[in-house]
Amino acid sequence: MQTQVLNAYMRRALELAARARGKTFPNPLVGAVVVKNGHVIGEGFHHKAGAPHAEVLALKEAAGRARGAALFCTFEPCFHFGRTAPCVDAVISSGIREVYIGSKDPNPLTCGKSIRLLRRRGIHVTVGVLEKEVVRLNEPFFCAMRRQRPLVTLKVAASLDGKIATRNGLSKWITSSAARRHAHNMRKYYDAIMVGIGTVLKDDPGLEVGGSHRLAKVIADSSLRLSLSARLLKTRQPVVVATVAHNKAKEKMLAARGVIILHIKRSSGGIDLADLLRQLHAMGVRNLLVEGGAVLTGAFLDARLADKIVFYMAPLIIGGRQALGALGGRGVDTPQKAVGLKRMTMERIGRDFLIEGELVYS
């Protein structure tokens, strides 16, 4: 097939995969298309963990017509037994003649194994069709497999001069209702949301998300100051408290409310964020949204553990030395060491501006 044709079918597989954004925790987003004689005869995408994989659904739709056809799948078909049987076996038994793969599966349980098996069985395999697009769609999964930690996105909402509150501590509302709705809706694409205990004590947020989305709420609380009456404990999503304290009485009371306690290594700033990310990874968290406040956001930047940023900028100037800035922490000592952005985009949300990008450390 010509490259243009290959890319078109893989783009369709990517479109299918993207339909499940935020729903496949802790699995990647995968789409598949079966093509025969220039016609699509089967499509599928992975809906959620435990559900059939994309390749199986596409082959099921194609049924007996799959024999001699071509399979386009964004990810290498899985090789191992998990909640479902290996997809590579289904591909081989279907009679598929050609397999076009967007990217190898970075999971060592599969990585390259299915490709080798398919080729041994006489099936033509091409790897790397729109690979960059596949990797970008699955950034959290690749980060988890390669770095053994979640992909971390910082969310900041501030005035034009970088303030998140006035000198009197008032912050409602700096950004517009349109921007707040956009930010709230964005939560459904993440496995977990994280804030510091200072934000919880000051604002008593629910950290909720609509629908049936499972969004774990992670609280950085080095001294176990979380109140048993906190609003976020009254919501249905799981709550995780990361602490360096050992208070058996308080831990018992929190556990009775369904709270998961993670004991984290101590660092100079309180919680060792690298250790926290390792433990969240062990829980299956792939995509973490950090909503602040300033101390926690600054700590992630100082530790160089944040990967992306989502910045809502309101066209307001608050001013004042005592007005709280969006970012705390040590910061940098020269402009040359400042954190940069790549693949940056900007759009208008209501009256505000949304700037997104990948963080680049000097």
Image: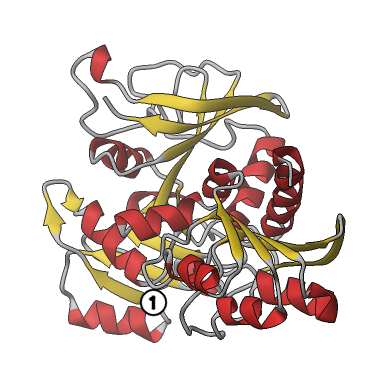
What residue is rendered at 32% in x and 44% in y?
Answer: 296
Residue 342, percent from left and from top: 46, 26
What residue is rendered at 40% in x and 62% in y?
Answer: 218
* Residue under label 1: 259
Judged left or right of residue 324, residue 346 is: right
Residue 101, percent from left and from top: 59, 57
For disc 1, the neighbor class at 10 Å (few under 14, some 14 to 19, many from 20) is: some
What residue is rendered at 38% in x and 86% in y?
Answer: 256
Q: Is residue 241 visible?
A: no
Give the amino acid at mark 1.
Answer: Val
Residue 150, by quadrant, is: bottom left
Indicate the secondary structure of the residue bearing disc 1. Answer: loop
Judged left or right of residue 155, residue 189 is: right
201 or 98, which lies in front?
Answer: 98
Q: Is residue 188 above or below residue 293?
A: below
Give the colour scheme of this rendering: secondary structure
In the rendered image, the quadrant that contains the C terminus is top left
What residue is rendered at 64% in x and 74% in y?
Answer: 53
Residue 321, by quadrant, is: top left
Residue 347, percent from left and from top: 67, 26
339 or 72, which lies in front?
Answer: 72
Residue 359, by quadrant, is: top left
Residue 325, percent from left and from top: 38, 27
Q: Is residue 303 visible?
A: yes
9 or 180, which lies in front?
Answer: 9
Q: Is residue 240 above or below residue 177?
A: below
